[in-house]
Image: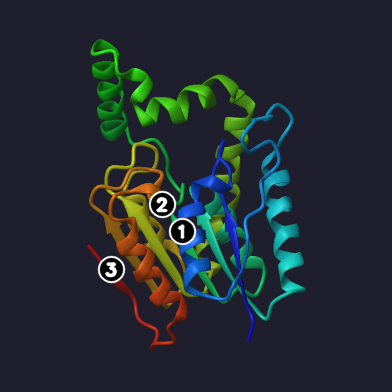
Amino acid sequence: MKTGVLGIHGFTGGPYEIQPFMDYLQAHTDWHIVVPTLPGHGETLELKNVSAESWMMAAEQALRQLQKEVDRIIIVGFSMGGIIAMYLANRYPVHKLVLLSAAAKYIYPAQLLQDIKDMVKDTVTGKLEENTLYKRYSEKLKDTPFPATLEFMRLVRIVQPYYGQIKVPVYIVQGKKDGIVPYATAQFIYDKIGSLKKEIVYSESGKHHICYCEDCEDWFNTVLLFLTGEEEERPRVIN
């Protein structure tokens, strides 16, 4: 049976956000992996005339194409991509679902404040250009129109009422130091989603870009075991 993996990146991001995990899966399986770039996203952001529907439709088209090439599909969604992944899992036959820093809720003030303090400290010491968070978000802040942000928020509201209808096995990964998505969001999704087989793993040091956290290799392997295993259905949380 041929397996395909559809990876979906986050808001203002691109395939690079989940590339480390996709590379890990590619190295350890013979699965067919596809990571489309959503409209307006990628290395250069063009978000002036995009909508929640355009992002959902692009992911849906990628899924339909993948259905023609494989027997079963796994969806991996990061941040906003996690919301789109749940939307697809509710509409199409999906084998398993992986949600990485899924943005069912967003902006965690305490951690974001700490990250900003780090940037201020780096500014004082002349090391701002070396701050990875600054590098990652400074350009995005300039290139993200407010209407696009409203579309992202609208997408979350569109999908949220249907969490309980999702029945596929799901693995949720969340960083405890995520400055964008509060780490409690993982438990919120776990409680709301209708899947009987569902698990959570928390990364103690993980920030929003969870695929680049220090302990990512640990959860990469754990998720792979979940994706390849056929053990009995049971809920489980790993702290």
Question: Helix, strand or loop at disc 1?
Answer: helix
State the residue lying farthest toward the front: 27
Q: Is residue 7 left or right of residue 193?
A: right
What number is the disc on residue 21?
Answer: 1
| Circles 3, 2 touching at the beta carbon (< 8 Å) | no
| Circles 2, 1 touching at the beta carbon (< 8 Å) | yes
Q: Position of residue 181 (x, y in %)?
A: 39, 43
Report the residue at 36% width, 51% height from top: 185
Of pointers 3 and 2, the one earlier in the residue sequence: 2
Indicate the amino acid at tag 1.
Phe
In depth, the one of 215 and 169 nearer the eye is 215
Q: Position of residue 50 (x, y in %)?
A: 71, 35
Of pointers 3 and 1, the one earlier in the residue sequence: 1
- The part of the image, by quadrant, that contains residue 47 is top right
Mark 2 neighbour density, 10 Å: few (under 14) some (14–19) many (20 or more): many
The residue that disc 2 covers is 211
Question: Helix, strand or loop at disc 2?
Answer: helix
Q: Position of residue 161 (x, y in %)?
A: 54, 56
Mark 1 neighbour density, 10 Å: few (under 14) some (14–19) many (20 or more): many
Indicate the amino acid at tag 2.
Cys
What number is the disc on residue 32?
Answer: none
Report the residue at 23% width, 51% height from top: 204
Indicate the amino acid at tag 3.
Val
State whether residue 32 is above or below residue 41. Answer: below
Mark 3 and mark 1: Cα distance apart in space: 21 Å
Q: Is residue 198 left or right of residue 95?
A: left
The residue that disc 3 covers is 237
